[in-house]
Image: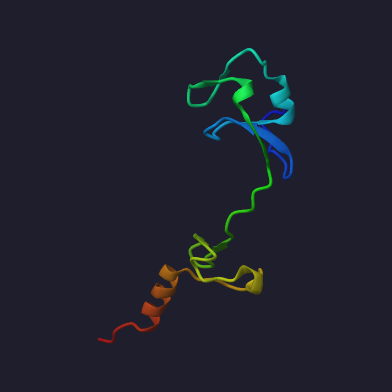
Amino acid sequence: MCGMQRIRRKDYYYTDQKKQNHWCQPCYEQLKTSAPILLDDGCEAMKKDLQKLKNDALAEEGWVECDECHSWVHQICALFNGRKNKSTASYQCPKCHLKAREKKVAPQK
């Protein structure tokens, strides 16, 4: 068995109908055809019922980290263009931006 290693991009793998359990090609080949497979949710499945898929899904949406509080925000939600800004641009999340504005415009007594 593979020891739960990551399934490489463009490789084939097998999954149950709920897509909660995954087997790489070598692990799938070691499964017995006649024996039920115990899934993580306690259900059972037969080897013939597993679906063959290819690990070619597109990467998820990019993230950007706030330079102040170090929280992470989807680039699209932050209106941050990762392609244009690359790694040299700084980013401040809305909460930190509002805090900075409040400090600049502190009410005078």
Residue 80 falls in which quadrant of the image? bottom right
Quarter in which the C terminus is drawn: bottom left
Residue 31 falls in which quadrant of the image? top right
Say if 47 sits above or below 90 in the image. above
Of residues 83 and 18, the one drawn nearer to the viewer in this rendering: 18
Do we see residue 1 in this rendering? no
Of residues 1 and 48, the one drawn nearer to the viewer in this rendering: 48
Say if 79 sits above or below 41 in the image. below
Quarter in which the N terminus is drawn: top right
Say if 29 sits above or below 17 in the image. above
Q: Position of residue 68 (x, y in %)?
A: 50, 67
Q: Position of residue 65 (x, y in %)?
A: 55, 63
- Does residue 13 appear left or right of residue 60 in this picture? right
- Does residue 4 appear left or right of residue 106 in this picture? right
Q: Residue at x 48, y 26 (%)?
A: 41
Q: Residue at x 59, y 54 (%)?
A: 60
Q: Position of residue 9 (x, y in %)?
A: 72, 45
Q: Residue at x 61, y 73 (%)?
A: 89
Q: Position of residue 106 (x, y in %)?
A: 33, 82
Q: Residue at x 57, y 58 (%)?
A: 61
In the rendered image, the residue lying farthest to the left is 109
